[in-house]
Each structure stands twice: as C-alpha cells, then as structure tokens.
Image: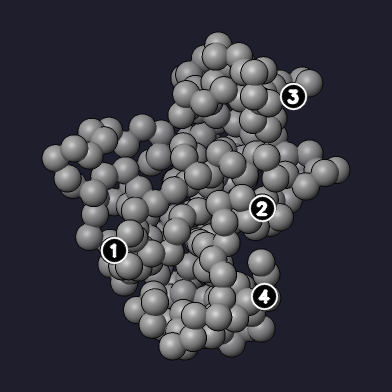
Amino acid sequence: MSTNYQRRSKDELARRVAQDIHDGAYVNLGIGMPTQVANHIPAGLEVILQSENGILGMGPAPAAGEEDFDLINAGKQPVTLLPGGAYFHHADSFAMMRGGHLDICVLGAFQVSANGDLANWSTGAPDAIPAVGGAMDLAIGAKQTWVMMDLLTKTGQSKIVQQCSYPLTGIACVKRIYTDLATFACTATGLRLIDAVPGLAHAELETLVGLPIDATAPAEQTA
C-alpha cells in the first residue's frame, strides 16, 4: 500500500467543510473540532452561526487577549459576535433547532455508519459524558447534518462502520462525512466518495475504511 499522501490538518479540514457552506446558510457548529469552521468561512459569504446556548450571529474566534468570557459558545469557548447578532433564551434556541430552521449542523462523531447513522455522545465507557446535550435535536432538526472527524481512531480503526456499536444519536441523519483523508456522502446504498487527499488511491481508502466506496462519479482531489 502506498503512503504517498498527507492528511489534512485540522485547519485544512475546517476549511474544506467551510467551502461547502452556501451563502445565507444558518449553521450550528458542534463542540470540539467543528467550532474551527467559523474561522474559515469564505470572504463575501453571509453565513449565520447559531449556538444552542442562545446566540445567533457568531463570528470567528477572538484574538488572543481579546476574549470576553461572558460571550461563549456551547462548548464554553470565547467567541465573537458579528454586527446584528443576538442573544436569546435557551428554549428559543432549541425551538430553532427542533423546528427545522437550521440549514446545516456540523458535528463530531465517534462512529458514523455507511447509511448515515450517527453515534457521537457516548462510547459506553464508565467515564463517558453522561448526557447527549443538544446533539439529538441538531442531528434530526437540521436540514443537513454533516460530520467532521478523523477517519481513524488512535488505534487505527475506521470511525466509518457498517453498523454503529456505540449508542446512537440519530438514525440515517448524516448526509456528509468530512475527514482528514477524504470526504464522503452517506446514501441509502452506502458510501459515495466526494473527494480524497492527493496521492490516496481508491483501493487503499477502501482498505482503511473496510467498506466499499462508490467512486463512479469523478472524485475531486482537494488538499
């Protein structure tokens, strides 16, 4: 197997996700890696970022030394507020999420199945986070649910699986999976390749994932 390829860094992965967000979209960025997408929204696009703790109109992360710790996202990270941004009650925020008012949510995951089942809140371990938070509301309420994650675990196992073994967050809700090696669409018939990092052969990607990957449509090579 060739190893003549380079994984996307977290910044590169965030930029890859951001380039697919359309102008005028209302977007929720999940806790962890997805929050970095806010720093890579293309210039000239109006993308309205929502946080489930009650913010609409978030901007990129504040510069070092300019943090306001009374202005935080759901992951307790300092954020900025763009002109016209607003604060509101937690219940109103969840009404937005559950009511289908978000175009896209970007979530992290422990596992995603080939048909789009999502497991992102617990591995079942004794020290696992004991609550799902807003992930279920986001995964089912948003018009599109995207996952952003490393393709492999620290032990080299694929996080994309035939069937999730961890507790599910949502069933058949994930439309796209953005990883450090490739981007996939989840369909009723399995995975479809959208793009892969340069130098990564299709056969090797299938070996890493352990599942067949439809590449009948030309795969766009991106960094």
Can residue 62 be seen?
Answer: yes
Q: Amino acid at mark 4?
A: Gln
Query: Which of labels 3 and 4 is toward the front?
Result: 4
Q: Amino acid at mark 3?
A: Leu
Observer-nearest residue: 1 or 18?
Answer: 1
Observer-nearest residue: 83 or 158?
Answer: 158
Can residue 211 be seen?
Answer: no
Instruction: Note whether 156 is above or below 17 in the view shown.
Output: below
Q: Amino acid at mark 1?
A: Thr
Residue identified by numbered label 3: 82
Residue 172, horizontal then vertical, whole percent: 40, 60
Pointers 4 and 1 in contact (C-beta within 8 Å): no
For the residue labelled by badge 1, is the local secondary structure a helix, a strand or a loop?
loop
Residue identified by numbered label 2: 15
Report how far apart the C-alphas of labels 4 and 1 lie in the structure: 27 Å
Horizontally, is 92 left or right of 21 in the view? left
Q: Which mark is residue 155?
A: 1
Query: Which of labels 4 and 1 is toward the front?
Result: 1
Residue identified by numbered label 4: 221
